[in-house]
Image: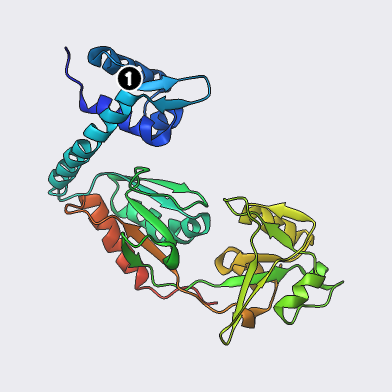
Amino acid sequence: MERAGLNELNAVIAIARRGSFRAAAIDLGMSTTALSHAIGKLEANLGVRLFNRTTRSVSLTDAGRLFVEQVGPALRDIHDAMEAVRAQRETPSGRLRINAATFAAREILSPLVIAFLRRYPEMSVDLVTEGRLIDIVAEGFDLGVRVADLVPSDMIALPLGRPQRYAVVGSPAYFGKRAKPRIPPDLLDHDCIRVRLPNGALYRWQFEKRGEAVQVDVRGPIILDEASLARIAVLESIGLGFFMEQDVREDIETGRLIRVLEDWTPPFPGLCLYYPGRRNLSAGLKAFLAMAREFAGRPGPAS
């Protein structure tokens, strides 16, 4: 029987993690056909099927589940050992996979990620944005970037040092016809852009002033699930919008949008970069963490 290679083992773990040959192939940087061939070869060598395949889904067989339970920890040890050796290189190389909320990715892309790639040209970064909070270890990521209070307690967190704020905004044309809200409950008399969260729920706008917290279940003519779309709707005077401040800061500064209820949107703890506590960090990850500490020490843009 031919021995399984590291690529075949990585393939099994990737498919089990992603639940899809196509998604696993993208993660592994290979074609779906090549991945399917590799799994077929491994199953033939083992004499058992590892996956149940249908046109719509992929799931582990009992043998596949046992295989993943046994091979997964050993494979992580192998990769950790390889990373430990790579860490001895003077020049960082390889790939970092980062999972982040969309607004968080926009915040770090230019000053941190792109700066990192320019400093270390042998590195590459796979930056994946999504609203849901995931297990970055189980999903194969090296790092996550989220608001501080969303960082899992079992992760090592590196605060990026910049407080966040929300901003309620409307267009000059909208306020040409409607009075500005003075307190959060006034929003119930306004058209607002509603936001659907990744779990399907509609977001309630959050406010606070001198320790008084208020949630408003706003009403409006449209429901969206992406900040860039909501910004377009606000610029088109469809209603008021509720954003992370950095997403509309330039619009406010240029007068395209008018900010209201600013005294009800105080700063709150900012973003954190987080990662699992591993004994051996790769040279690339160490270099990225060092640059993140530099980034955290810089003053943020004026509000």
Which quadrant is the N terminus positioned in?
top left
Q: Is residue 144 above or below residue 44?
A: below
Q: Position of residue 60 (x, y in %)?
A: 37, 27
Q: Residue at x 27, y 24 (%)?
A: 8
State which quadrant residue 262 falls in: bottom right
Most distant residue in the front direction: 62
Task: Work out whether residue 238 or residue 49 is closer to the camera in this orientation and state it.
Answer: 49
State which quadrant residue 293 falls in: bottom left
Residue assigned mark 1: 39
Q: What type is the residue that disc 1 sits on?
A: Ile
Mark 1 Cα-neighbour bin, 10 Å: few <14, some 14–19, many ≥20: many
Q: Is residue 6 above or below residue 293?
A: above
Residue 10 in view (yes/no):
no
Q: Position of residue 177 (x, y in %)?
A: 87, 71
Which quadrant is the C terminus positioned in?
bottom right
Q: Is residue 130 above or below residue 247?
A: above
